[in-house]
């Protein structure tokens, strides 16, 4: 293969003229003949037994050219793109055949390339760090959440119902003395103050005791979903069967032993504080990175081809589909349940796709400006990390991820590190 010419024909569009040597093209034609000849019948020969010269005489000299071109075209174009020093973007390719025959193959291909990128002033960005301090109140709140999770329900027999109690009731609703559809329930568990029922209903249960029977007078809201009930006054006859409440365990050493691996409440609280501090520090670092990404994207100057955004959306949609499958759903069922169509779903991924494409271009440019070249040791270490994460051999991973692509990923991470380390971090107000 040889690159005859490379010409810019539009923004991020280049036309390459590529030549494939005669002997390379001839071998491809011969492979095409051996593959297709088994299907061809020529008068005077058994099916699949006709010599190539007879087939070409019968069907034309170029009978195998299309298959041969399809064989050599991808690698020839790839080599030409690399020789031209361009970075190819998966997009529509305009192909023009110049010559194919005994002299070899010559074709022109118009491709989309990554844009020319400019970025300045990426060092010394000003960012604010979130407050990561953990207070005693934060720790107590976590302890109380654990107490809530381990609460038990106890029956109340010595007092009337109060707010936050769980009541078990029968009820039947009436409009103008007549029962209405959907207005009846038996042994229904209702938490008072949860606002599960229409306004006023739960408040009128408060103060009643077990086995009380009473009427609750309410008016349905004007925006109620049932047309026949909107704005109508109603009476519900209620029987209160049971009152229950949550009983939280005491926050003591025994509780700590029950819910953790620690022997004392103080040790348990210290562990909670440690994890809260770690979590908040990570969240603060992630927030700083997000601030940096937003600022870098704002500094980026480039005319980005639409194909790059669409390709990123394609990847995000595929990943979303895999997540759905892991949850037992398929893509089409999800669209049906949510009332979305494929285009609306794709459009919902657009903002994050644009952000991802821009930051990748920005960091790749910074890596070049900073002359970042990952060492072989760094590349091998990254292969090992990936292999360990997926419980594979490093050699297997190398079969999936080309070294050049992995080196780019490492360079991008190191570029982000340079920007991060140079940022001016102040405390958020």
Image (spheres, rainbow, N blue to C red):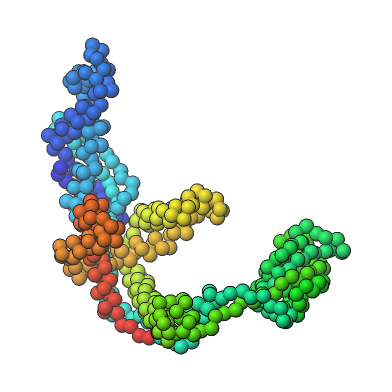
Side (left or right) of 203 relative to 151:
right
Quadrant (top left/top right/bottom left/bottom right) for the C terminus: bottom left
Residue 84 drawn at (x, y percent): 18, 52
Observer able to see residue 131 = no
Q: Nearer the viewer, residue 290 or 238?
A: 238
Quadrant (top left/top right/bottom left/bottom right) for the N terminus: top left
Side (left or right) of 282 relative to 151:
left
Side (left or right) of 241 relative to 428:
right
Residue 49 drawn at (x, y percent): 21, 18
Residue 210 location, quadrant? bottom right
Q: Nearer the viewer, residue 84 or 5?
A: 84
Residue 236 location, quadrant? bottom right
Observer able to see residue 194 = yes
Give the residue furthest to the right.
177
Q: Nearer the viewer, residue 308 or 324?
A: 324
The residue at 24%/20% (across/down) is 48
Residue 188 drawn at (x, y percent): 70, 65
Q: Is residue 73 above or below residue 148?
A: above
Give the residue furthest to the left.
23
Residue 420 drawn at (x, y percent): 29, 76
Q: Is residue 57 above or below residue 394?
A: above
Residue 406 location, quadrant? bottom left
The residue at 18%/19% (across/down) is 51
Q: How many marks?
A: 0
Give the residue furthest to the top.
44
The residue at 80%/59% (across/down) is 180
Side (left or right) of 144 relative to 155:
left
The residue at 71%/61% (across/down) is 225
């Amino acid at each position: 293969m040889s690159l005859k010419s490379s010409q810019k024909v539009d923004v991020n569009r280049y036309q390459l003229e590529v030549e494939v040597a005669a002997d390379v093209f001839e071998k491809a034609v011969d492979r095409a003949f051996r593959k297709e000849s088994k299907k061809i019948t020529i008068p005077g020969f058994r099916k699949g037994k006709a010599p190539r010269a007879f087939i070409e005489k019968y069907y034309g000299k170029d009978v195998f050219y299309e298959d041969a071109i399809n064989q050599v075209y991808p690698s020839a174009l790839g080599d030409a793109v690399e020789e031209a020093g361009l970075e190819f973007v998966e997009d529509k390719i305009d192909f023009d055949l110049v010559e194919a025959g005994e002299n070899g193959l010559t074709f022109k291909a118009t491709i989309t390339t990554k844009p020319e990128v400019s970025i300045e002033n990426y060092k010394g960005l000003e960012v604010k760090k979130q407050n990561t301090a953990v207070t005693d109140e934060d720790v107590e709140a976590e302890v109380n959440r654990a107490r809530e999770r381990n609460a038990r329900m106890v029956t109340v027999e010595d007092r009337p119902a109060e707010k936050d109690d769980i009541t078990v009731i029968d009820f039947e609703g009436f409009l103008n003395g007549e029962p209405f559809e959907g207005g009846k329930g038996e042994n229904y568990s209702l938490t008072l103050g949860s606002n599960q029922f229409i306004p006023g209903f739960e408040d009128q249960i408060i103060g009643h005791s077990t086995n009380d029977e009473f009427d609750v007078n309410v008016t349905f809201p004007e925006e109620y979903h049932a047309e026949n009930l909107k704005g109508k006054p109603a009476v519900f006859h209620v029987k209160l069967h049971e009152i229950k409440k949550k009983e939280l365990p005491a926050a003591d050493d025994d509780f700590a032993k029950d819910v953790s691996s620690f022997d004392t409440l103080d040790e348990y609280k210290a562990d909670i504080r440690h994890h809260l501090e770690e979590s908040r520090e990570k969240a603060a670092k992630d927030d700083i990175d997000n601030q940096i990404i937003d600022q870098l994207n704002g500094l980026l100057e480039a005319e980005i081809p639409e194909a790059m955004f669409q390709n990123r959306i394609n990847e995000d949609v595929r990943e979303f589909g895999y997540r759905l499958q892991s949850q037992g759903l398929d893509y089409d069922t999800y669209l049906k349940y949510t009332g979305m169509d494929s285009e609306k779903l794709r459009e919902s991924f657009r903002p994050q796709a644009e952000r991802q494409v821009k930051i990748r271009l920005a960091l790749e440019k910074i890596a070049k400006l900073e002359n970042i070249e990952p060492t072989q040791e760094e590349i091998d270490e990254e292969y090992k990390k990936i292999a360990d994460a997926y419980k594979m051999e490093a050699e297997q991973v190398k079969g999936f991820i080309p070294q050049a692509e992995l080196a780019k990923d490492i360079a991008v991470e190191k570029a982000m590190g340079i920007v991060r380390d140079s940022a001016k971090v102040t405390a958020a107000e």
